[in-house]
C-alpha cells in the first residue's frame, strides 16, 4: 500500500481516530454487519454465557452478542481506539446501563480478562493488526477449557496466507481448528476460522 493510502486507511479503519475514524466506523457498521452476524451465529452463544469481542470497532457485534447471551450473560468488548470505544458505547446505549455489555481499552494481545474466564471469544476484521502468536496465546489464556474462538477477516486485508491463522491457532494449543474461505459476490472471500480450547 502506498504512503497516501496508508495515511487515509489507517486512521479510518486500522487505528480509527478523529473524523476519519468516525466515518470509518459508520462504513464498517454497515459493510461488516454480515460478518459480525456470522461470527455471533457461529459462536453458538447461549443465554448466560460470557463473551469477549476483541477489536469490536463500532460495536455491531457487541449488540448481537448481548442479545444472544441475554440478561444473565455478559459481553466484554476491548478495542485500543478511543473513537471506536465511544461509537460502540453509543450503539450499546441500552446494553451498558443494564450491565450486559462492558467496553474496555485493550487488544487481542492484552485483553485484561481473567484466566479461563470466558466461554467464547470473537474477532471480526482485526487479526491483521495483531502480533499473531501473542494474540492467539492471550485468547487461549482467557478462554475456559472447552471455550470457543470464532474469527473472520476479509481476505484482501489479511496480508498473509490464511493458513498462517490456522497454524498460529494450533501452536497456541487450540483443537478442532477449522479454516474456510467463503466466496462473496461483492467482496473478497471471508476468511473464517473456528477453534476450541481443549477441555481440561
Ligand atoms: C477494521 S476495524 C474492524 C472493526 C469491526 N470488528 C468490524 O469488522 O467492523 C479494526 C478494529 O481493530 C482494532 N484494533 C487495532 N489493533 C488491534 C489489536 N491489536 N487487537 C484488537 N483490535 C485491534 C481497531 O481499533 C479497530 O477498531
Image (cartoon, rainbow, N blue to C red):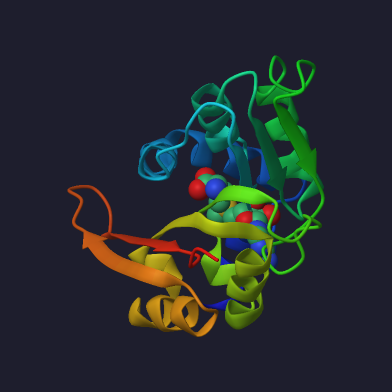
Q: Position of residue 171 (x, y in %)?
A: 50, 85
Q: Residue at x 61, y 42 (%)?
A: 51
Q: Is residue 159 visible?
A: yes
Query: Position of 139 compared to 151: left or right?
Result: right
Q: Quadrant of the C terminus?
A: bottom right
Task: Estimate the x, y position of residue 165 in percent, counting from the top left.
Answer: 43, 76
Is 154 above or below relative to 92? below
Decide if residue 11 is in sight here: no
Place residue 129 in its image quadrant.
bottom right
Q: Is residue 15 above or below residue 53?
A: below
**In the image, residue 151 lies at what x, y percent?**
45, 58
Image position of 93 (left or right of 180) = right
Q: Nearer the viewer, residue 144 or 86?
A: 144
When the figure is inspected, residue 146 is found, relative to residue 29, above or below; the finding is: below
- State the residue at coordinates (48%, 81%): 168
State the count of labels: 0
Amino acid at each position: 500500500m502506498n504512503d497516501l493510502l496508508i495515511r487515509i486507511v489507517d486512521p479510518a479503519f486500522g487505528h480509527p481516530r478523529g473524523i476519519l475514524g468516525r466515518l470509518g466506523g459508520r462504513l464498517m457498521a454497515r459493510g461488516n454487519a454480515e460478518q459480525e452476524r456470522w461470527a455471533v451465529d457461529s459462536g453458538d452463544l447461549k443465554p448466560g454465557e460470557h463473551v469477549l469481542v476483541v477489536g469490536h470497532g463500532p460495536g455491531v457485534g457487541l449488540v448481537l452478542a448481548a442479545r444472544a447471551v441475554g440478561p444473565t450473560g455478559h459481553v466484554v468488548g476491548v478495542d485500543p481506539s478511543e473513537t471506536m470505544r465511544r461509537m460502540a458505547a453509543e450503539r450499546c446505549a441500552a446494553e451498558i446501563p443494564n450491565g450486559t455489555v462492558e467496553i474496555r481499552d485493550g487488544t487481542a494481545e492484552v485483553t485484561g480478562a481473567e484466566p479461563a474466564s470466558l466461554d467464547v471469544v470473537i474477532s471480526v476484521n482485526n487479526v491483521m493488526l495483531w502480533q499473531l502468536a501473542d494474540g492467539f496465546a492471550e485468547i487461549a489464556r482467557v478462554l475456559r477449557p472447552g471455550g470457543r474462538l470464532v474469527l473472520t477477516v476479509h481476505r484482501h486485508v489479511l496480508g498473509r496466507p490464511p493458513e498462517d491463522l490456522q497454524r498460529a491457532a494450533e501452536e497456541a494449543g487450540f483443537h478442532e481448528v477449522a479454516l474456510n474461505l467463503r466466496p462473496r459476490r461483492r467482496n473478497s472471500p471471508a476468511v473464517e476460522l473456528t477453534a476450541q480450547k481443549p477441555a481440561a
